[in-house]
Structure formats: C-alpha cells, structure tokens
Image (cartoon, coloured by chain):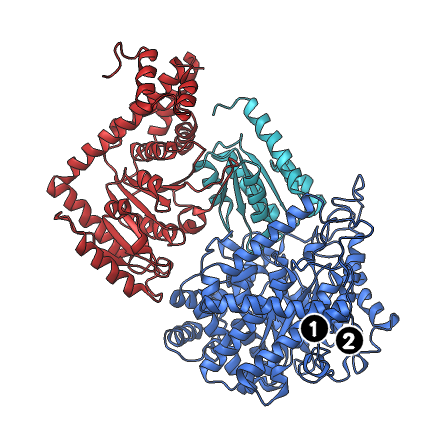
Amino acid sequence: MASAGQGPSERKPAFTNSSGFEIKRLYSGDDVASLDYLRDLGFPGEFPYTRGPQATMYRGRPWTIRMFSGFGSAADTNRRYRYLLDQGQTGLSVAFHLPTLLGYDSDHPRARGEVGKCGVAIDSLADMETLLDGIRLDEVSTSMTINATAIVALCLYVAVAEKQGIPAHKLRGTIQNDILKEYIAQKEWAFPVRPSLRLVVDTFEWCASNMPEWNTISVSGYHIREAGATAAQELAFTLIDGLTYVQEGVNRGLKVDEFVPRLSFFWDLHNDFFEEIAKMRAARRIWAREMKRRYDPRDPRSCTLRAHMQTAGVTLTAQQPLNNVVRVALQALAGVIGGGQSMHTNSYDETYALPTEQAVTVALRTQQILQSETGLTDTIDPFAGSYYVEALTNQMEEAFSRYLERIDAMGGMVKAIEAGFPQMEIADAAMRYQAAIDNREQLIVGVNAYQAEGADAIPILEIDDSLEAEQVARLEQLRARRAPGWRHALEAVRKAAFGGANLVPPILEAVHAYATVGEIMDTLRDVFGEYHDPGYY
Amino acid sequence: MEGPEEHSSLAALLDRALAGDGRSAARLMTLLESDVDATPAIMSRIYPLAGHAQVIGVTGPPGAGKSSLVDKLAAAFRAQGKTVGIVAVDPSSPFTGGALLGDRIRMQGRFSDPGVFIRSMASRGQPGGLAKASQNVVALMAATGKDTVIIETVGVGQEEIDVVRVADTTVVVLVPGLGDAVQTMKAGLLEAADVFAVNKADYEGAERLVKDLELMLHLGSSGSAWSPPIVKTIATEGSGVDQLVGSLAGHFDYLQGSGEYLKRRRRAAVAEIDGVLRGQLMSAIARRVPAFDVYASQVAERKCDPYTAADRILRESGLTAEGLG
Amino acid sequence: MVIAKAGMDGHDRGAKVVARVLRDAGFEVIYTGLYQTPESIVATALQEDADAVGISVLSAAHKHVFSETAREMRQQGLDDVILFGGGIIPPGDVEWLEQQGVRRLFLPGTSGPEIVAWLQQAVSAQRASGSGG
C-alpha cells in the first residue's frame, strides 16, 4: 500500500492497540495474501474452528446468559436461586465469599470484615445444603467460581447431590479450578504451585470416570487481563496455562480424549472492539492447532475451544457511572461477534459496590437486546474475511508464538511463574496503560476527557454487617453438635495428601462428616505448605 | 539549625528509643538516613551500647531469594528466643530520587511479631552514603536491644560489599541458573563470604554450582583456618535453614575462639573511623575552599595535576600549615 | 510512604500501579504485598517511620480495614501519619471512613497525577504543622 507519510496529516504519528500492534491507515488484500481459507479459517464446527466451535452457532441456540452473583448467607442466596429458577433460568452461578475461596472458616481472624461480602459464606456441608435446598441438582447446571479450594467445593456439591439421591454422573456444571492464573494474576492461592496442580489433575481424573458431564476447569484469561495484561498477553498466557494442564493430565496417565473435551476457557471483553474479536478467533485456531500438533486427538472436541466471556470490570469508571452501560454493551457486542458460548455482563455501579438489582437487570437486558433485536444471531462469524480482522487474528497468533517460545525456553509455565515472568509482564503493561491515561494518549470519557462536575447520583447496594456474627454462631453450633467422625476423615485426607492417592474420595468423605472447609484446607496446608506472595512488581 | 530545643528533643528521642519505644527508634533511623548534623550526637550515645548483637550480612545477586531466606532466618532466631532486627538495603533505586522497596513482601510472617523490627533503606543519591547510614542503623538496632541484626542487600558490587562489611558473619546467597555466576563473581564478594547459601537447591544446576564453589574455594584457599561452608537451601520451603543457622553459629564461635573477632572488630573500627574522617574532612574542605570547583576544572583540562591541586586545596583550607608534604 | 494491599482478595493491580507512580514522582515507597491486616500495616508504618500510609481494599472489607487501621494508628501514637486509600468503596461509606480518620479515598478512574499532587500537598502540610522529624 501507499506510504502513510504523504497526504493529509493524521491525529497521531502512530496508532497502536493494547497488544502493541501498529494499526495501519488501511487494510487490503495484501495484508491477508497468505490466508488460505480452508487451512486458516475453515467452516464453523470444523478444524481449525476459527469461525466457531459449532456448526450452527447462534442459529441453533444463542449464547447462554450466565450472570454471576451471590452474597450474604446460604439461606439468602438460596431464596435468590429459587426465584431465578421460577423465572425460567436453568443455570446457577455460585459466587463464594473470600474466606471460602482461600480456605478459611468464617471465624478465622483473617476472615474479619469479609464474611458474606463478595459472595456467599460456605463453611461446611450444612451451608451447602442450605444453599441448594429444594433445588434438584439433576435438573440444573451449576457454575462455581472457585480455584484454590475448588476440590473442596466440588466435593460439597457432589455430597449434596448424593444426599438428594442423585449420583455424580448426572451432574452438569463447571468449576473454575484454574490455579495457574491465580499465581499469575488474581493471587487467591493457598498452596505452592506444584501441589496445587496435583489437586487440579485429581479433579480431572476423578471427573473423567465419575462426572462425564462436568466441565472440570475454566482456563481464565479474564483475571490476567483485569490485572493489566494486554489482549495478546491474555491470549498467550491463558492458552499456555491450558496446554500446561493438558500435559499435567497426560503425565498422570489420562488419555487426552478422556478429559480435554471438558476443558473450557474464559475471556475478558475489553474496550478495543476489533482486538477482542481477533483475540477470540485466534484463540480457537491456536488451540486447535496446538492440540493437533502435540497430541493428534481423535475426538474433535479435544481441539475445540469453548469460551465463557465477561465484560471488563476494569474499564468501568466511578465518574459518570451511567456511561458504563454503554461500555458494557459495546464490549458484549465484540464478544458476540467473537463467537463465545456464554456471557456475563457487568453492572454499571460496580466501581462502588456489588450491583443493585436494578443495575443487574440493565446488564441482563443488554444481552437480551443483543440476542433479540440486532440480527447478530442470524449468521456466523460475520467479520471473517475483513482485511483488518483477519490481519489482526494472524498477528494475535504470532504474538502467542513469541510468548510460547520464551516460556518454553524458561522450562515451561510453572518455571516462568516461579521466576515471575508473566507477573512482571503484566505489571509493566498495567503501568503503561495507566501512563497512557495520565498523559491523555488514551482518552477515557469522564476521566480524562469530557469530565463533569459533581457525581451522578445512583442507588448503591448496602450489605448488612450483622451476617458475620450469625455465620460464626452457626459454625460454632455445627462444631458442637457434629459426630466425631470428622477427625478420622481428616486423618484420611492427610494420609492421601502425603501419599499420591487421588484426594477427591477422602475429601468427599470429610465433607460428608461435616469437617469444615477451613479444617480440610488446614490439613492440606500442613502437608503442602503455604504459598506466599513472591512480590513481583 | 541546632538550637537547644532541637538538642533536647533529640536527647528525649534517644531516651525513649533506648527504653524500647519503636516509634522513637524509627525516627532516629530516619535522622541517620537523612540528617548528617544529627548523626554524631546519636552515634555517641548509642555506639557504646551496640556491642552485644550478632550481626549477620546477607548479600547476593537479584532474584537469589535473599529476602525469603532472611525471613526464615529471622523465624529460626525467634524460635531460639532471640529478638531480631532486619535492615533491608536496596542500592538500586533510579535517579529520580524515588524508590520502590519490596523486601517486606517476602517477610510477611514477621510483620506482627513485636520481637522483630524491619527497616527498609534506599540510596538517597549520595554514593557511599548508604553504606554508612545502614551501618549506623544496624548499630541503633543493636543498641535498642536486638540480639541478632541481619543486614540484607541486593547485588554483588562494591557498594553492597561495603554495606555488609559491618557484619560479623556474611552469607553470600547464590542460585543456579544465573549464568556463570561463579566465574564472573567479583573477587571482593568471595572474600566477603563466610558462608555460602546455594538457594533454590531443588533447581537444575544446583549440584554443579556447589561443585564450582568447592573447586574455587579449594583453589583460592588462603591458608585461613576458616573455610566457608556451602549450605543448600530452599528458602520458600524453609529447608536447609537449620543447617544455615548452624553454620552461622559455627562461624561466630570460630571468630570468638580464634581471636579473629577482635581482629575483625579492629579492622572494622579502622574502616569506620576512616569513613567518618574522610566525610568530615571533605565537608570541612568544601566549606573552607570555595575554589574547589576551579581546581577540579583545571585538573580536568590538564592545566594542573591532582597532586598539586590537592596540596593547594589543603594549604588553602588552613587545616594544616604546610600541606601534608 | 507505605503502600499496602489489605483484604482477602488478590487484586493488587491498583496498589502496584500507585506504588510505581509514587516512586516515579520521587517518593520512597515501601510496598508490603498482599493480605495485610491493620496490625501489620501499622507495624510497618511505625518501623519505616512513614509520612503516609496508603491502603487498597477491593473486597468490601474496607470499613473494617480502614477503621481498625485508624484506631491502631492512634493507639500507637501515629496520629500524624496520613492515612489514605482506594478501592471499590460506596459513596456512603466514604464519608463514614473520613470520620474515622481516613484523610482521602480514591475511587476507580483516579489519575496518577491526581494522587501525587494530593499527597505532595498533604505531606508538606503535615511536616509544616511541625511534628518533629
């Protein structure tokens, strides 16, 4: 193409996106000259899945609207679930409070001020029974966002089902269970990296023979991006995490087709419209190619990347909060064009607190408008063949390859994490993004452009502080009245942790005996040790 | 600047710090870092009281896991019932004058223990000043009753060696996989090492690093009665820390049994006086000889040689009637 | 300057970015890492003789963390140390926290220069008000 040096002047000397790719004034056939349709794009539901994981995509069934929620006590959340199920929703999504996520009971000193705040307080099977009371677990699909304590949460869910007389193999749902991104980005860990990986593979292994319809992991770019990563970093680190899990499973002796079809992914939807679409398309193609190259699986589902999506919380602003409604809609639009399988849309008030019901409804309606009114669900991968989007998709794949090469040279993702490599890459990117806002290279409406005096008055959700004492009292009662078998069950957990046996069966026994989440995790901490913030900044 | 009020408040601060008030001790440390005028008065009060602590220096290249190891050492000393002071020195801050100090991140276990006092120090722009200031802070920690003081610094250059020179025992922490660390190691650092810790001993290359060190120590052995032991550690898991504590105790016993302790103290005293004297001389000269810069320009332009210039500066300062000749 | 990340959540992006911004503005910043408690934050501020303490909380435990830190600071005689912070904090709580002794709270969307300018002013005002040091 003609050089951009001549002709009318432009707003900036160079245009780039978050991933650092230089964006040209114009894209043409020259930019995608090497593109081979069948090799690089293919048809929906066919290798390399660039155009989508299923043959009919949204013409068959639109993406699943899956809104993540929960706070307060198990009883509060149970009432909410039953209301949602009465309204026709078929999926539940559980947000646990932080003490459960980190493996501490509500009466632990570190839990002070946190009980029931960012999710529901679950200390034992008793709480889980209350949470799911009156809900037939063979009739719903449940997503549980939990990582360091994922194996315990899975056992709690299975135990409730067993008490309802429902065998594990009938259960459907997803557990996040992605511990690598905790070390990289979200930092909600418990044990050192290697024993944590063992727990993940224990769940792969147990679910492969006991819970064939359960998604055993949601490999998450979301938290990596929210921590400051670029789109290319989100893509690369997440896919390399996924490949690491697959290899760990293979090392355990699992066959790829036994467990890889149950892996799913989770993307962030940020502000740059085209970059996000390219990221999601590239992700499907890379996953298919890497799986084929490494393992040549027979089951095509082992090469198919299915993704959950969520709009980027980090892009929401406290200033002029109603503008967030627009941001969320545009981010969701990119996700739909990118071809994801389920989505959560954020609420406009989340820079202040957990969302109000009204704000959640607007977020939900945003997705319903996209599904019903825009024609987006009528054809598949509509941006395929766009010179720009295809060129960006190729660039994303190249960026992935560069990171893969560097991380391989370090000895793999675990070594790279221990050396702080992805953590420091992300911290640097976060700093560059902030600097771009501070020097107004990147404009954010209401923040460094089009500011307005005074704040928009919006309603804010209040959370009752009295829950903590109630939850602690419930826990004390449980400890006083449970049968003594829990001690013996914890000993069995300890023995299995020391040895190499799969930890799901003894933890399942322990939760049945009403050992608490904190007690089970303390037992494992005793054996595995604790992970501490290595402080890469 | 130094009104009587200032003096009495300094004296009160010293009283409170020596009576065990942490806030006052922290204030004094800030003065030692930043207020040259207050330093002599502080030092004259605390120096006689600072002789009881065992001072341990920890140094090594970035990423060797020094802070984690210091954290585990502190825990081990606490388990022996000893109080611990930690001075975490980072000479690597950039020129903007700002600094970002993160050593505390790896010492999480110690934050709420009243028997441990941690102080972070960054270079404030004066080369060499950091070594002196951090030595003085070590003395203050000792004077306020810490049984063990650990001074930790990142890096392997001259400045870092100066920082740990105040220690009775110096641990040099190395890790496998930092290239040919041993081959390129500064001779000064090797001499400074009383104990080697090979950290991240579960990593590939740890055995080779130990072998290389053994070979080098063998080749370079100076006939000294102390040969630095090499201890393998995994700081994040705490393994090898007990052996390291044992080696430190062994070295301390050796120092005292062999009379080396007094020799070292004397060498350190000479260095300390030397440092203070140089500082005082230079600032006195700077005050008395406004033409210092002119001499510097003349030397730079080779119109004058440094010896002649120094001689003239000295005469002009009036510090000596006939120069030093 | 002490920058601490409190609460049980691991979202340390804000704390790290603020720490770097302050360093680049010439402050000496002690970064404590994650999972700090009011007690550990105050112990750090005391030992490091900090002029100011900044705490990031995104877990909704902000009321507990800030009010306990302020109380502990008063108890340890650190009344003259500036306590500030940031995170996901409802406007109604901001006012309450300021009454507890938090000097300023920065919400999402705050620029680096805004924090730097406020801190420079607050620190020099605090020093001018003459509390020794």
The residue wearing badge 2 is A381
Of residues A53 and A32, the one drawn nearer to the viewer in this rendering: A32
The relative height of residue A472 versus residue A218 in the rendered view (above or below) is above
Shown in cyan, the chain is: C
Q: Secondary structure at mark 2?
A: loop
The relative height of residue B57 versus residue A188 in the rendered view (above or below) is above
Query: Which residue shows up at 73% across the image and 48% down it?
Result: A318
Q: Residue B2 — which label? A: none
Shown in blue, the chain is: A
Which picture quadrant has residue A530? bottom left
Q: Is residue A125 visible?
A: no
Task: Please state the total of marks drawn on the protein image.
Answer: 2
Shown colour of chain B: red
Q: Quadrant of the N terminus of chain A?
A: bottom right
The residue wearing badge 1 is A281
Q: Is residue C33 visible?
A: yes
Residue at the front extreme, as displayed: B303
Which picture quadrant has residue B85? top left
Residue A443's spot in the image, x, y percent?
74, 48
Callout 2: chain: A
